[in-house]
Amino acid sequence: MLDIKKNREGSKLEFALDGRLDTITAPQLEEEVKASLDGVTELIFDFSGLAYVSSAGLRVLLSSQKTMNEKGRMVVKNVSEEIQEIFDVTGFSDILTIE
């Protein structure tokens, strides 16, 4: 299960994720992100409540990053050690801006 909280302030959009970003929940996040990016120049993912990310979740992050490369910037913040390790092993730590 994944709880997605969305907060938009002007051209800045933040998604706070709580739970698991996996094969079942990734399409839900992808749909939410795609529907919300109009006029957004800064996209933030807050992972403070995220327990797990699968390859399907990584695909959504990669897709979001590619979109934001043309519109502005994307940041992933509050990443746990476990998820940071997944980012390191997959090379995502070189692609994403992690704060």
Image: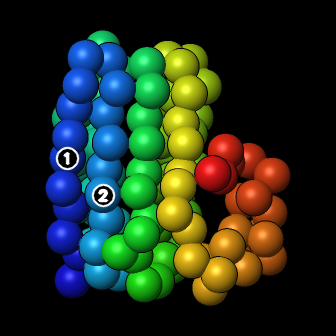
**Which residue is rendered at x = 40% and y = 76% of the image?**
50
Q: Is residue 99 left or right of residue 59?
A: right
Q: Which amino acid type is marked by label 2?
A: Ala
Residue 83 location in percent, x, y?
60, 77
**Which residue is rendered at x = 72% and y = 79% of the image?**
85
User: Is the C-beta separation of discs 2 and 1 under 8 Å?
Assistant: yes
| CA separation in Å, label 2 and label 1 | 6 Å
Foreground residue among 19 and 38: 19
Residue 44's place in the image compared with 38, above or below, is below
Total labels: the figure holds: 2
Foreground residue among 4 and 56: 4
Of mark 2 and mark 1, the one earlier in the sequence is: 1
**Does residue 86 appear in this view?**
no
Residue 35's place in the image compared with 81, above or below, is above
Residue 63 location in percent, x, y?
51, 44
Foreground residue among 78 and 35: 78
Residue 13's place in the image compared with 28, above or below, is above
Q: Which amino acid type is marked by label 1?
A: Lys
Residue 72's place in the image compared with 48, above or below, is above
**Which residue is rendered at x = 42% and y = 84% of the image?**
51
**Dot 2 lies on which element?**
strand
State the image quarter where residue 17 is shown. bottom left
Residue 16's mark? Answer: 2
Q: Is residue 53 left or right of residue 5?
A: right
**Does residue 36 appear in this view?**
yes
Which residue in the structure is indicated by mark 1? Answer: 6
Q: Is residue 3 left or right of residue 44?
A: left
Residue 79 location in percent, x, y?
56, 68
**Which residue is rendered at x = 18% and y = 56% of the image?**
5
**Dot 1 lies on which element?**
strand
Here the colouring is: rainbow
Q: Residues within 10 Å of mark 2 (few under 14, many from 20)?
A: some
